Amino acid sequence: MNNRHQKILDQIFQNPVRSDIEWADIERLLLALGAELTEGSGSRVRIVLNGVRAVFHRPHPRKETDKGALQSIRRFLQEAGVR
């Protein structure tokens, strides 16, 4: 994990919850952490990290992840043992 990945991880866990983190940056972070990403139907992305599974929707038409989805990403990362 490089400095950019660490910066994104820090932003994910900042309070108050941010709404300006691009989904592509989150996907790159997850891959750097060793997650497996597979495409689902539509905008769905299946993620497996440290044995924890989740399904998320890529945001559209905006690139940024909304606050609710970011809170779900936080919970997923915590359950997977990150942070």
Image (cartoon, grey):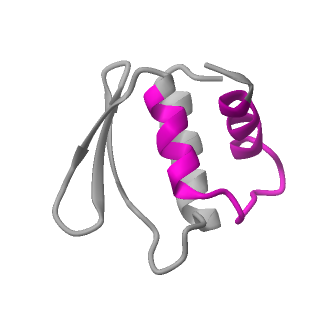
Q: Is 81 drawn above or below residue 18 in the view shown?
A: above
- Horizontal side of 12 relative to 81 (left or right) equals right
Q: Is 28 drawn above or below residue 34 in the view shown?
A: below
Q: Position of residue 22 (x, y in %)?
A: 60, 58
Q: Position of residue 30 (x, y in %)?
A: 48, 33
Q: Is 12 drawn above or below residue 60 in the view shown?
A: above
* Residue lying furthest right: 15
Residue 69 or residue 6, whichever sits in front: 6
- Horizontal side of 35 relative to 80 (left or right) equals left
**Residue shown at 53% from the left, 19% from the top:** 81
Instruction: Assign the magenta stretch its main secondary structure.
Output: helix
Quadrant location of the N terminus?
top right
Residue 15 or residue 36, whichever sits in front: 36
**Residue shown at 69% from the left, 40% from the top:** 8
Q: Tell whether position 9 is magenta.
A: yes
* Residue lying furthest left: 41
* Residue lying furthest bottom: 61
Q: Tell whether position 14 is magenta.
A: yes
Tell me the magenta residue range: 4-31
**Residue shown at 60% from the left, 66% from the top:** 64
Quadrant location of the C terminus?
top right
For the image, the number of numbered tags is 0
Q: Position of residue 31 (x, y in %)?
A: 44, 30
- Horizontal side of 33 relative to 70 (left or right) equals left
**Residue shown at 31% from the left, 21% from the top:** 51
Q: Quadrant of residue 44?
A: bottom left
